[in-house]
Amino acid sequence: MFFGPLNKNFCVIFYIFTVFSFIFICLAVVGGIAVLVKKPKLLDLKNSVASVLALFNLLLVYFIYRLIHTMCIKSL
């Protein structure tokens, strides 16, 4: 009962996480473009690398949740 498999309805949790991850990616891209337009002096190597790594991290989280959601749907 406490350690058994869950039913297919719990796959929705991974779908919700996927949607939130995609929204965060969109916000990060729009925010990055806004910073580049309003304050181009902030474009140095340190900030650029940090922004690219943060965006890569968000893309990775999105991909992982999407993959887990697909695996959850296909396995049940």
Image (cartoon, rainbow, N blue to C red):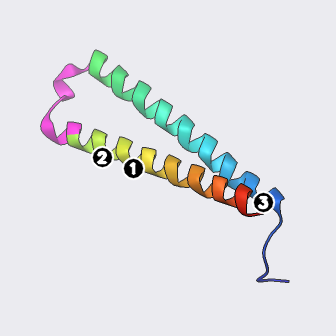
Q: Decide whether residue 12 is among the magenta residues.
A: no
**Residue closest to the eye, 12 or 72:** 72
Q: Which residue is mark 1?
A: 57
Mark 3: secondary structure = helix
| Horizontal relation, residue 26 to residue 65: left or right | left
Q: Decide whether residue 42 is among the magenta residues.
A: yes
**Tag 3: residue type?**
Phe
* Sequence-wise first label, 2 or 3: 3
Residue visible at 51% across and 38% down in the picture = 24
> Which quarter of the figure is the C terminus placed in?
bottom right
| Horizontal relation, residue 6 to residue 28: left or right | right
Residue visible at 73% across and 55% down in the picture = 73
Q: Which residue is mark 3?
A: 10
Mark 1: secondary structure = helix
* Sequence-wise first label, 3 or 1: 3
| Horizontal relation, residue 20 to residue 49: left or right | right
Q: Which residue is mark 2?
A: 53
The answer to whether the residue labelled 2 contacts the one labelled 1, judged by CB atoms less than 8 Å apart, is yes
Range of residues picked out in magenta: 39-48
**Residue closest to the eye, 50 or 3:** 3
